[in-house]
Structure formats: C-alpha cells, structure tokens
C-alpha cells in the first residue's frame, strides 16, 4: 500500500481520536490551559507513551527507519514560544485545528489559514532565521542513547510506562 495512503489513514484515525476525545472543545482546551481539566494532557501522555514504545519496538524489529534530526535549541525555543502563543490565542494546536476545521468550526478554519500564512512567512524568513537562530545553537543529531550508551528501546520502555502511569494514575482534574 502506498505510504501516502497509509499516512492519510493514520491521520484520519488520529483526527477521529482527537474529535472523540473532545480535544477540539473550547471548554476542554481552556480547562487544559488552566490546568484544571487533565483530559487532553492524559490523551497526549497516552499517545506519546504508546507511540514512543511502538516506534522503538518497530525500529528494533527493522520495521521502521528513524531519522534523527539535528538539535536546534534556538529553533526549538522560538518554535515553542510561537506554538504556545498560537495555542493560547486560538485555542487550537496544529492537529486540533484541522479536526475543528473538518467539523466546520470557523475559528478553526481561520486558525488553519493563519498557520498556512505563518508557514509561508517562515519559509520567506528561513535564510535569516537559519543564520541567526538555528545554526548558532545546532548541536547535531544527538540522542540520549548516544550520550549514555544505552539502546533506545531500553530508554523508551520506562519513559512510556512513566507517561502511561501519569495518564492513568497521577493526573487528576482540579475543578473548584
């Protein structure tokens, strides 16, 4: 099966999970940002925990090919700030705005359009950002596995278990 078709199907399932999990609900997103409603954080912890373990087990079995990207700390910091501001202002992250747009929510549609405009502006500004923000803080394709010399699957197992334990046993809603 074509990898684009597989990616589309996986994306559709991910979108359905976001929709069914209430990740496009303004009330739920606001509760998450206020650290009162832990549902979306639990959803993310579960997805990251299962995904991390799954991808490293697939890699261990030779069924995945991980391509480690360089650690651009300046770019990660700047991107995190832009992402956080965008999420707080719009109430959507990149995945949930697409799902919200598919639901027909106008604010989500405008968020998708804003993201596309932002991506275009980023592409125009990339040469300057690359020289000023990315390259000075480029630490190369470094991994925790390389730093401590342990096979990544043995790091993924406790990391995944920790995230799943947080999702199911630690994080509690804090309604007042």
Image (cartoon, helix red, strand yellow):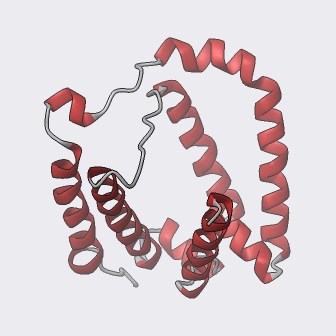
Q: Quadrant of residue 174?
A: bottom left
Outermost bottom residue: 20
Question: Where is residue 70 drawn, in percent x and y?
Answer: 46, 27
Q: Is residue 173 left or right of residue 17?
A: left
Q: Look at 23% across and 53% down and name the residue there.
A: 156
Q: Quadrant of residue 10?
A: bottom right
Residue 85 is at least partly visible in this image:
yes
Question: Where is residue 160 drawn, in percent x and y?
Answer: 25, 62
**Near-viewer residue (40 or 147):** 147
Q: Is residue 153 left or right of residue 124?
A: left
Q: Look at 30% across and 33% down and name the residue there.
A: 143
Q: Look at 51% across and 75% down and name the residue there.
A: 31
In the picture, which quadrant includes the C terminus? bottom left
Give above or below for 129 relative to 56: above
In the picture, which quadrant includes the N terminus? bottom right
Outermost front residue: 1
Q: Is residue 170 left or right of residue 86?
A: left
**Near-viewer residue (118 or 90):** 118
Question: Where is residue 175 drawn, in percent x and y?
Answer: 40, 84
Residue 93 is at least partly visible in this image:
no
Number of numbered discs: 0
Q: Is residue 88 left or right of residue 45?
A: right
**Near-viewer residue (141 or 162):** 141
**Near-viewer residue (67 or 104):** 67
Question: Where is residue 47 drawn, in percent x and y?
Answer: 41, 68
């Amino acid at each position: 099966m074509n990898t684009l078709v597989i990616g589309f199907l996986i994306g559709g399932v991910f979108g359905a999970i976001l929709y069914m999990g209430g990740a496009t609900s303004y009330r739920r997103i606001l509760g998450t940002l206020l650290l009162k409603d832990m549902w979306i954080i639990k959803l993310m912890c579960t997805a990251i925990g299962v995904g991390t373990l799954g991808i490293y087990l697939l890699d261990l079995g030779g069924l995945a090919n991980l391509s480690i990207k360089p650690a651009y700390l300046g770019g990660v910091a700047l991107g995190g700030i832009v992402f956080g501001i965008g999420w707080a202002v719009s109430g959507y992250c990149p995945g949930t705005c697409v799902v919200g747009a598919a639901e027909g929510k106008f604010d989500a549609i405008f968020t998708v359009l804003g993201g596309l405009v932002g991506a275009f502006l980023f592409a125009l500004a990339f040469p300057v950002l690359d020289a000023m923000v990315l390259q000075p803080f480029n630490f190369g394709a470094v991994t925790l596995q390389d730093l401590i010399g342990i096979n990544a699957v043995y790091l993924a197992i406790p990391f995944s278990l920790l995230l799943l334990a947080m999702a199911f046993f630690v994080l509690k809603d804090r309604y007042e």
